[in-house]
């Protein structure tokens, strides 16, 4: 027990020094069932927001509703790409396409059915989002969603744009 | 051994710090949940001799060009209530080395994998449920051409903290005919085989120690419609959970989507017969499954609707599901200024007809007994920049006699739910929920409420209560009061609760929790 707490303490003190989360090359699928990689989007040379979610996660849907409302306005300020990565397993992954269409989400939605990408990017719970700069370098991450979190997301994107 | 593990992890961390600047990078996560159980006089549950329990997971990953490695250290001291006690202790449970470049991907060591929809094979981790059936062995994936992918696996699946006595070997191949022929038309053909060998030392002559399963998948999509089917045939697999049944198993799944701007409809049908496929034939429960058979129903997350979750009857069930989403345009009379979102879901699960000569289920058939049914209607509407509401109603039927234990009630319940989200400023918000469940069966009526005060992005304070006020015997409150704090890489939640086993969302994060009463502390770090 004591040893485990030593390890936890060691990590909590040292994680900022070794924080190196990067965009993974692990395969996932588009809603049209094409194989894609998150690393493919770094070629766009735009800041990326990568947000993990699931169809059964209420706070995730709240976050995306808020982003949907604001994203056009934001893109006039910062040219960025928003990518929603669904971690729905086979119970609900097939529902993602109809949910996305029904809620008119104006961003890219990908499916990580066996949570390989989630694991590769060290995500332990949803909602969870990362922000990467134009060169694919990690800038910011956040766990959970509370109303107002979307403005923090915009603030971080503006920092990248140099505003 | 512990000292070796400790030294290895610390060395990994120090080496990562030193070398991560220009020789690849190190990343990882830490997840720790600790409970302190107290006596529950209301539920007549005494305090355990050791009131502390703690589950801890440390994942470390290293990437350098096409090479990567990962290790996971787990410590259960002891495991949380509801988790298998054989997990107690601490150990390295996951270790692999991987090479990925262009058309080839090779993993040696532990890996997770899924073929198709998982009806035949899925190796995965669910920390919320204590399931981890990662395979230890070798996996090779090749893409000789853009439209063909072939994956082969060989290894032994994990069994609790150790390895199973079974060996798995298999392959899966996917041919993207749409890409090969015409890009505007989606057409994929796929198939695979999984074979399980588990030595048998019992008295039965010619007992089948090797069981094979075969799958065939076809998916097609054009314009607003797409369709996906999978058929699995499983060989004779006598085991404890199926009462040493000597019939073949099978599964058939059809999923379809119809989508058009602002509208989406999902429809599904699934038929299962003798599909319990596990690495240890003498075990029961979900810890040794080779395949993955979640229930084909709406995944409820509201407190009361989660009381009666559907569980899959792997030896025989037929199910259908329909899920529709529609956005009423903003600016219209019905949609209001900000638009309104509607969602409707229906699912129905029942038994199958039986063959007269051997009482074996007919796979594609509907019998006369309902196992589960639900109908949910949900409306989400934003009224102003500071007020949003969600109203839903669920009508469900739950055959507790089949899904839990013989002799129990057939439950029919009606559950209305109202949620309001109020924004006081760009940072401060309040979320409230009120729910009620009417039922004349089982433990009778329930009422529930939740309030969460949020200060984005760092802090949330939440209280919730479920009260089974109709139960004259227990008449208890199930509450959860706590606080959650978030920084860039760290999230800490703490609280005091009495929980039913079920799925909860608090502080913006959703988790499956077992039944207990006491204090909890959760730490999540991603780095």
Image (cartoon, coloured by chain):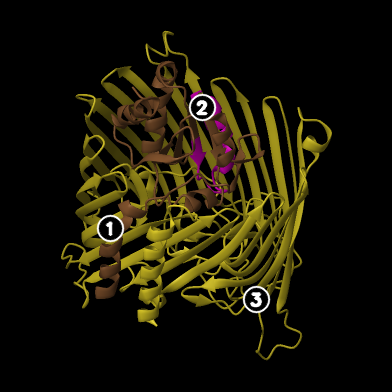
Instruction: Answer yes or no: are tags 3 and 1 on the same subunit.
Output: no
Determine the image quadrant of residue B390: top left
Camera-side residue: B288 or A6? A6
| Residue B406 in view here | no
Q: Which residue is mark 1?
A: A12
Left or right, residue B236 beside residue B61 = right
Q: Residues within 10 Å of mark 3 (few under 14, many from 20)?
A: few
Q: Residue at x 28, y 74 (%)?
A: A3
Q: Is residue B495 left or right of residue A122?
A: left
Disc 3 is placed on an element classified as loop
Please, which chain is the residue tagged with disc 2 on? A
Real-space Cα separation, disc 3 to disc 1, in angstroms: 50 Å
**Residue B26 at what x, y percent from top left?**
44, 56
Chain B's colour?
A: yellow
Q: Chain of mark 3?
A: B
Q: Are marks 2 and 3 on the same chain?
A: no
User: From what the image shows, is residue B354 above or below residue B245?
Assistant: above
Q: Which residues are magenta?
A: A84-105
| Whole-number angstrom distance, CA of label 1 to CA of label 2 | 34 Å
Q: Residue furthest right?
A: B181
Badge 1: chain ID: A
Chain letter tied to brown: A
Closest to the observer, B355 or B154? B154
Could you tell me which residue is drawn at 43 percent across and 52 percent down? B21
Give neighbour class at mark 1: few <14, some 14-19, many 20+ (Cα, 10 Å): some
Residue B496's x, y, as percent?
Answer: 19, 55
Q: Which residue position holds label 2?
A: A107
Residue on which the image places disc 3: B244
| Nearest to viewer (mark 1 / mark 2) | 1
């Amino acid at each position: 027990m004591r040893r485990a707490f030593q390890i936890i303490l060691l990590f909590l003190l040292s994680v900022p020094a070794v924080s190196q989360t990067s965009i993974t090359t692990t395969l996932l699928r588009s809603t049209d069932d094409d194989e894609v990689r998150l690393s493919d989007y770094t070629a766009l040379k735009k800041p990326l927001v990568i947000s993990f979610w699931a169809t059964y996660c209420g706070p995730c849907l709240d976050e995306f509703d808020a982003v949907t409302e604001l994203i056009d306005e934001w893109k006039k300020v910062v040219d960025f790409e928003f990518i929603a990565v669904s971690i729905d397993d086979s119970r609900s992954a097939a529902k993602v396409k109809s949910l996305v269409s029904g809620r008119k989400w104006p961003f890219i939605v990908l499916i990580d059915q066996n949570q390989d990408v989630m694991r590769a990017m060290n995500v332990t719970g949803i909602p969870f989002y990362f922000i990467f700069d134009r060169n694919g370098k990690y800038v910011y991450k956040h766990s959970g969603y509370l109303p107002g979190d979307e403005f923090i997301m915009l603030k971080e994107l503006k920092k990248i744009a140099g505003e | 051994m512990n000292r070796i593990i400790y030294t290895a992890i610390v060395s990994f961390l120090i080496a990562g710090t030193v070398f991560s600047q220009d020789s690849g990078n190190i990343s990882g996560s830490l997840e720790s949940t600790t409970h302190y159980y107290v006596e529950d006089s209301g539920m007549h549950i005494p305090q355990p001799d050791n009131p502390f329990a703690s589950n801890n997971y440390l994942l470390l990953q290293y990437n350098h060009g096409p090479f990567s490695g990962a290790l996971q250290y787990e410590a259960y001291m002891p495991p949380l209530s509801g988790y298998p006690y054989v997990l107690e202790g601490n150990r390295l449970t996951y270790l692999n080395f991987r090479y990925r470049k262009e058309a080839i991907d090779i993993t040696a060591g532990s890996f997770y994998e899924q073929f198709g929809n998982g009806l035949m094979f899925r190796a995965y981790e669910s920390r919320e449920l204590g399931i981890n059936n990662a395979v230890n062995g070798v996996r090779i994936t090749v893409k000789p051409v853009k439209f063909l992918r072939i994956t082969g696996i060989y290894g032994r699946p994990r069994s609790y903290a150790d390895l199973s006595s079974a060996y798995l070997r298999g392959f899966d191949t996917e041919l993207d005919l749409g890409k090969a022929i015409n890009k505007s038309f989606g057409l994929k053909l796929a198939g695979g085989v999984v074979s399980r060998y588990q030595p048998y030392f019992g008295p039965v002559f010619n007992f089948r120690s090797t069981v094979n399963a075969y799958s065939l998948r076809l998916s097609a999509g054009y314009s607003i419609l797409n369709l996906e089917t999978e058929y699995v045939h499983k060989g004779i697999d006598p085991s404890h959970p199926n009462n040493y049944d000597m019939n073949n198993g099978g599964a058939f799944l059809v999923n379809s989507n119809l989508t058009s701007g602002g509208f989406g409809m999902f429809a599904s049908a699934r038929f299962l017969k003798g599909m319990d496929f596990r690495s240890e034939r003498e075990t029961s429960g979900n810890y040794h499954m080779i395949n993955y058979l979640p229930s084909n129903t709406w995944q409820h997350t509201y407190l009361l609707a989660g009381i009666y979750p559907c569980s899959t009857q792997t030896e025989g069930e037929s199910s259908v599901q329909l899920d529709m989403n529609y956005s009423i345009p903003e600016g219209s009379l019905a949609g209001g200024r900000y638009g309104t979102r509607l969602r409707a879901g229906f699912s129905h699960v029942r038994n199958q007809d039986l063959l007269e000569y051997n009482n074996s289920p007919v796979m594609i058939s509907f019998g006369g007994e309902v196992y589960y049914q639900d109908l949910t209607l949900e409306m989400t509407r934003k009224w102003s920049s500071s007020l949003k509401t969600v109203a839903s109603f669920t009508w469900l039927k739950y055959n507790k006699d089949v899904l839990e234990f013989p002799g129990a009630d057939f439950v029919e319940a009606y559950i209305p739910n109202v949620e309001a989200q109020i924004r006081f400023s760009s940072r401060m918000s309040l979320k409230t929920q009120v729910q009620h469940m009417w039922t004349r069966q089982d433990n009778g009526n329930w009422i529930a409420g939740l309030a969460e005060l949020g200060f984005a992005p760092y802090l949330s304070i939440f209280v919730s209560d479920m009260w089974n006020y109709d139960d004259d015997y227990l008449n208890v409150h199930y509450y959860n009061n706590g606080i959650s704090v978030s920084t860039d890489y760290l999230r800490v939640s703490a609280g005091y609760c009495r929980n039913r086993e079920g799925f909860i969302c608090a502080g913006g994060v959703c988790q499956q929790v077992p039944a207990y009463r006491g204090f909890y502390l959760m730490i999540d770090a991603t780095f």
